[in-house]
Structures are given as C-alpha cells and as structure tokens.
C-alpha cells in the first residue's frame, strides 16, 4: 500500500500541476526547490519559488518604499536612468501605455529603479515624472544605494547594469512582471511595443488568477 | 518653315533638359529621404518616436510644421552639436537635452530631408550644400 501511494503521489502532483494550466495562467520563473516540511504530523511537499527579496528605496516624492509597500500588489519593474540617451525613452513611452491602462487600479503598480542614483536625486526624479506626465502613486521612480540597486537587479533576472564611457550605463530594457507573492511571472522587452501589449494582457490574466493558485 | 522647326527643336530640347533636371533632383530627394529614414530609425526614433510624436513633456515632437520650417536652417546644428536649454515647440516648453548625433554632414542632410518631409512637414530636399552652409552658422 505504501508503495502504491509512493507511486500515486507523483502522478497526483503532476495532475495537480497540469490542472493549473486549464484556464490561462502565466508561468513562474526562476529557480525553484521542493521543500518538505511537517504540517499537522503529515509530510507536505511544497515548491519554493524564486521571489524578490526585501529592499528599501526612496521614490520621487521622497517617501521610503520597501518590498512591503508592494504587499498584495501586482507590479512591473524596470531599470533606467533619467539622462539615458538610448533605450529609456522608448521603454518609458511604452511603459506609459501600461500606466494608462492600470493607473486607477489600486493593486497594480509600476516601479522604475534608477541605476544612476548619484545624478537621479529625488528632485530629478520628480521633475522627470512631471515631464513624463505621471502623477499619483501608481508609478514610482526609485533611487537608493547604487550597489543595492545593482544587486537587486540580479533577483529580477535582468542583466546587471554596467558603467560605460559612451552610453554612461549599459543595461537591458526588460519589464519584469511580479505577482502578489513576489514571484516573477513574465519578462518583456520594454523597447518592443508588441511585447508590452502582451504585458498588459498578462497583467489582466494575472489579476484574474484564482486566489488558490495565488495563495 | 525651317526656322520654326529649329525653334520647335530647341524648345523640346529645353523642355527635356528641364524635365531631366527635375527628375534628377527628384532622384536626389528620394535618395536622401530613403537613407534618412534608416538614419532616423537608428539615431532619432528612440527619443522622437516612430511618428515624430516625442515623449510627453520630456522630448519635443517633430510634428510642429511651423517650428520645423521656421527653424530649418538651425536644424543641422541641433543634429550635429545636440541641443540644450529651453525651447518652445507647439506651444509647450521643453527643457531636455539632446546629445550630439555623431552624424556626418551628408548623413545630416539625409536625416533632415527625411524629418523635413515626414510627420506633416514639407521642407523639400535639404542637401549637403545647404547643411554645410547651415553648419557654418552654428552658435
């Protein structure tokens, strides 16, 4: 009998997994590990997904923003700097579409980390936000310790920014979609209008995800 | 009668000459425009947008036909040396900075012919001579 349950368990688990995929759900990215723990005197195996770690930055209004400020929210993150001559204007032209689609929804946020915090002071970020035409608290432009920013970029699975003589900084233009459990659910080329349209669709899908998969 | 034929011949010859002249200018225009489009895509579009729409109040649009035609002789300097400081385009103020493009004068002629004849603008051909003349006046 024990043997049978041993056989059945994986089958059941696979079945449970695949049943998630009837209705459209988004994949979960990053490394994962199964963790077995004792729960009510039973052995339970859970999958631990890659999540975004704790962080602390300051937004364009001078407010402290931490990972906790995003509890219970779906959010999109990117890395940029205000004096970027290359891809940032395209990224934020596209991000404006995301902003406009969801700015009235309290549980959806956008956060843009500056990779040039020395230049991008709170005042500079505020001016950039005004120039971009964004207001309120649905899109935060964040700055903080440079090394902390670069380290954090790794957990979003984007290429770590590099300083460069000509371009000032080299970074990739990905928009990362994070769910309410702080797991990575999508990654989109922010310079590609089509992919950003997909991001907007995926946010709707993620928002509609039943609470049990999003426990 | 012979005189008449000679005049007719001369007139047609002149006509042909003018026509071929025009069409060679036309060809020059098309060449500039096509090359300029590619240069625009790689050097300008990220900031000014696919349709010259700019980006909110950060980057001015290239769709203000008044601005473009009035300032057509300053554009080469903007593209070569970049632009800084406050400018007024379409009744809005912009205070960004545009980096020097690194383009050669002939490339500037091409990209300006493209910009000058897209997004509603109609400046006609902006050729190398014109650009070289304009560049001498840069401040």
Image (tube, rainbow, N blue to C red):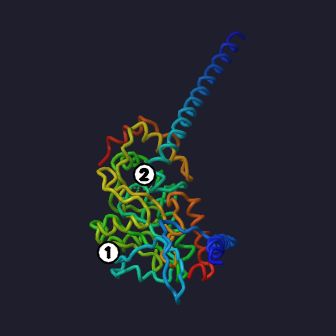
Residue A165 in the image: x percent, y percent? 29, 51
Q: Position of residue A159 (x, y in %)?
A: 40, 58
Nearest the camera: A198 or A32?
A32
- Chain assignment, label 1: A
Judging by the rendered image, the residue that carries numbered circle 1 is A122
- Relative horizontal placement of residue A68, taking residue A199 as reference (left or right): left
Against A170, is A144 above or below? Answer: below
Residue A136 visible in image: no
Residues tagged 2 and 1 counted as in contact (Cβ below 8 A): no
Q: In the rendered structure, find residue B71 and report the number of the disc placed on it.
A: 2
> In this rendering, is residue A38 above or below B131?
below
Label 2: which secondary element? loop
Residue B89 position within the rendered picture, expressed as x and y whole percent measured from the top left: 44, 61
Seen at 37% across and 37% down, the residue is B132
| Label 1 secondary element | helix
| Mark 1 crowdedness (10 Å alpha carbons): few <14, some 14-19, many ≥20 | many
């Amino acid at each position: 009998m024990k043997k049978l349950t041993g056989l059945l368990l994986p089958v059941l688990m696979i079945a449970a997994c695949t049943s998630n995929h009837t209705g459209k759900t988004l994949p979960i990215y990053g490394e994962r590990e199964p963790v077995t723990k004792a729960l009510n005197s039973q052995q339970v195996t859970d999958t631990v997904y890659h999540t975004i770690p704790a962080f602390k930055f300051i937004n364009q209004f001078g407010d402290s923003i931490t990972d906790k400020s995003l509890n219970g929210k779906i959010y999109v993150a990117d890395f940029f700097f205000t004096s970027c001559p290359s891809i940032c204007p395209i990224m934020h032209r596209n991000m404006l579409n995301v902003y406009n689609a969801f700015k009235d929804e309290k549980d959806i946020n956008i956060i843009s980390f500056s990779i040039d915090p020395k230049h991008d002071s709170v005042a500079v970020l505020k001016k950039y936000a005004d120039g971009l035409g964004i207001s309120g608290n649905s899109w935060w432009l964040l700055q903080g310790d440079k090394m902390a920013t670069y380290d954090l970029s790794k957990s979003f699975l984007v290429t770590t920014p590099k300083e460069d003589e000509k371009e000032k900084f080299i970074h990739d233009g990905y928009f990362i979609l994070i769910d309410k459990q702080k797991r990575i659910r999508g990654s989109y080329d922010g310079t590609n209008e089509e992919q950003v349209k997909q991001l907007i669709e995926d946010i709707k899908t993620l928002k509609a995800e039943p609470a049990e998969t999003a426990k | 009668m012979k005189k008449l034929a000679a005049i007719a011949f001369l007139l047609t010859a002149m006509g042909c000459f003018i026509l071929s002249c025009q069409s060679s200018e036309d060809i020059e225009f098309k060449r500039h425009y096509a090359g300029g489009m590619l240069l625009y895509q790689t050097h300008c579009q990220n900031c000014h947008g696919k349709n010259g729409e700019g980006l909110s109040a950060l980057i001015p649009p290239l769709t203000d036909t008044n601005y473009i035609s009035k300032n057509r002789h300053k554009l080469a300097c903007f593209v070569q040396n970049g632009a800084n400081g406050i400018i007024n385009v379409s009744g809005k103020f912009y205070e960004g900075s545009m980096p020097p493009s690194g383009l050669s004068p002939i490339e500037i002629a091409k990209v300006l012919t493209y910009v000058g004849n897209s997004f509603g603008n109609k400046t006609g051909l902006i050729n190398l001579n014109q650009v070289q003349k304009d560049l001498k006046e840069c401040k």
